[in-house]
Image (tube, coloured by chain):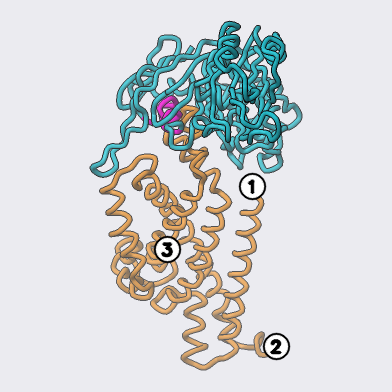
């Protein structure tokens, strides 16, 4: 125990690493939901048999973008996206640059989860909304999104947990954060204390995210 | 009043054409309830989808009080849909909305002012007998209460026509009666035109003024309940007044001819059987029977076995003279009960 508090690395680098990890997860979670949610809605609505089928665009988005992006291992995708991160943020280092590739890596993942959530909305509810004279936008906002809100929150929770894992990997290629700390000190310098502390912190972070997500999801669920 | 004229709907399945509706024509006057009964696959669901404009008919028309609905432009389709309120088998309420929220849903769509929504919702919930349940979520309501919310929601946009698709098929018998009575009551009070699609003859018996039998996309029999019930050979009559299968009784009458008799209205008040027995001085046995009041008239459907030496033709003539339909049937069992159900 004493070791933890007297460890110079932890005292010096840990607070910064925690902030960087939270930054990466926070920023990329924001953009993932911001872009992934509409993308998932669009994929669902334009699918064959959907509210507004658009077979060609749906095919392109679904197969080409989402599936290809998802099939590239994240570690490789991240390296490949460094030029893009530099173009967007002006740097290839640090949590903000890492958030670019993190977001791009998780947007398709989240979009697929959103699509699945919307597919689970009972078709009778859509019929009912149509019969009462809803526009498609009204059906999306008042029926699809609202009825699947508990599931969407659960999907977002899963996505953020995945982001925590990805952010540790991002640390290795310049993102910083707990991943970098664990790698630099725990792995390359065999500092077991640093390794254990980072692992515990990451586990706690994931637990907290999961707990909060489940609480919110359950609170929204009236079924 | 809703009028459906020569409605056809043809689906394409690859290269095959499937005719789901093959020239359906019907009309239901204001203030009355019309039942459409048929097997699954008869075209009931397609008919519902065409009536609610979820599907465009291939040809033919649907009109309400003379206004054509089936050919409105896409931009007007939502306004047209609001003239038909729909009640679903499973109510199809939004789980995330309270009872009041569900009833408010159609009103929100057309930007009704908040205070107006509140008073209208209260009024509608009262109408269906759900005062005090405003804040209950569908999961906290029973099946019958959910269906009441569904009915209130269907009435929110002041429709002229109420279309009920198997409204009671998911409910227990007691709740079924409550919901049917509610529909009947609302029809009279609000002067609605009601179409009930169902596979249950009991629903037709209890609330319908008239009925159509849908089979393979066509209406093969239709009419006021008391008219169709009086036809011995009609499938609807057989379904409305079903006879259980029976075996000839053993004993004295065992080889006598078997007769099916259908009497209705005034003739039902005359003692038919004792009349026959006295007139021809013979014994007879009732093998099976069903007596009901349909559309305000009494009906009886009996299977009777006469004495072996009976003058069958004379009995038949006696009955026909009194306006009672009767015919000879095979002795061993009931004829195959075809048709509705």
- Residue in the foreground of this view, choosing between A166 and B126: B126
- Residue depicted at x 57% and y 31%: B331
The residue carrying pointer 1 sits among few (fewer than 14), some (14 to 19) or many (20 or more) residues within 10 Å by Cα, namely few
Q: Chain letter for mark 2, please.
A: A
Seen in the picture, residue A1 relative to B322 is either above or below; the reply is below
Residue furthest front in the image: B309
The residue carrying mark 1 is A223
Magenta span: helix, strand or loop, mainly?
Answer: helix
Q: Position of residue A88 (x, y in %)?
A: 33, 61
Discs 1, 3 touching: Cβ within 8 Å: no
The residue stretch that appears in magenta: B45-55
Chain shaded orange = A
Q: Is residue B219 left or right of residue A219?
A: left
Chain corresponding to cyan in the figure: B
**In this figure, which residue is indicated by the disc labeled 2?**
A1
The label on residue A106 is 3
């Amino acid at each position: 125990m004493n070791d933890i508090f007297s460890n110079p690395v932890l005292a010096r680098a840990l607070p910064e690493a925690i902030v960087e990890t939270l930054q990466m997860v926070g920023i990329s979670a924001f953009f993932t939901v911001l872009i992934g949610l509409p993308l998932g809605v669009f994929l669902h609505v334009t699918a064959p048999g959907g509210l507004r089928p658009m077979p060609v665009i749906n095919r392109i988005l679904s197969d080409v973008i989402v599936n290809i992006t998802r099939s590239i291992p994240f570690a490789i995708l991240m390296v490949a996206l460094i030029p893009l991160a530099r173009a967007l943020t002006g740097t290839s280092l640090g949590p903000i640059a890492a958030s670019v590739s993190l977001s791009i890596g998780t947007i398709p993942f989240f979009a697929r989860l959103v699509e699945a959530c919307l597919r689970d909305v009972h078709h009778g509810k859509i019929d009912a909304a149509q019969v009462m004279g809803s526009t498609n936008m009204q059906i999306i906002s008042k029926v699809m999104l609202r009825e699947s809100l508990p599931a969407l929150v659960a999907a977002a929770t899963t996505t953020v947990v995945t982001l925590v894992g990805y952010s540790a990997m991002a640390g290795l290629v310049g993102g910083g954060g707990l991943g970098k700390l664990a790698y630099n000190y725990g792995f390359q310098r065999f500092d077991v204390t640093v390794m254990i502390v980072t692992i515990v912190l990451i586990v706690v972070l994931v637990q907290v995210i999961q707990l909060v997500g489940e609480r919110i999801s359950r609170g929204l669920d009236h079924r | 009043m809703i009028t459906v004229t020569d409605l056809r709907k043809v689906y394409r399945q690859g290269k095959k054409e499937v005719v789901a509706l093959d020239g359906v024509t019907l009309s239901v006057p204001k203030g009355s309830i019309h039942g459409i009964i048929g097997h699954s696959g008869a075209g009931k669901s397609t008919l519902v989808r065409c009536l609610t404009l979820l599907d465009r008919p291939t040809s033919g028309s649907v009109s309400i009080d003379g206004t054509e609905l089936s050919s409105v432009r896409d931009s007007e389709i939502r306004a047209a849909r609001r003239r038909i309120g729909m009640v679903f088998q499973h109510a199809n309420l939004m789980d995330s909305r309270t009872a009041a929220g569900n009833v408010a849903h159609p009103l929100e769509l057309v930007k009704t002012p908040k205070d107006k929504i509140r008073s209208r919702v209260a009024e509608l919930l009262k109408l269906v007998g759900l005062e005090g349940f405003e804040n209950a979520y569908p999961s906290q309501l029973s099946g019958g209460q959910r269906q009441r919310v569904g009915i209130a929601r269907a009435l929110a946009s002041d429709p002229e026509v109420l279309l009920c698709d198997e409204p009671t098929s998911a409910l227990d018998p007691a709740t079924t009666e409550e919901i049917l009575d509610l529909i009947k009551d609302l029809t009279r009070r609000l002067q609605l035109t009601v179409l009930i699609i169902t596979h249950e003859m009991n629903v037709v018996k209890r609330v319908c003024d008239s009925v159509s039998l849908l089979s393979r996309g066509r209406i093969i029999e239709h009419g006021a309940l008391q008219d169709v019930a009086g036809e011995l050979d009609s499938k609807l009559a057989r379904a409305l007044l079903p006879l259980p299968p029976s075996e000839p009784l053993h004993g004295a009458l065992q080889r006598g001819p078997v007769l099916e008799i259908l009497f209705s209205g005034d003739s039902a008040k005359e003692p038919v059987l004792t009349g026959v027995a006295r007139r021809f001085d013979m014994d007879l046995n009732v093998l099976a029977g069903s007596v009901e009041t349909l559309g305000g008239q009494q009906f009886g459907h009996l299977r009777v076995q006469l004495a072996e030496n009976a003058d069958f033709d004379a009995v038949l003539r006696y009955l026909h003279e009194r306006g009672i339909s009767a015919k000879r049937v095979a002795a061993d069992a009931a004829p195959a009960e075809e048709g509705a159900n």
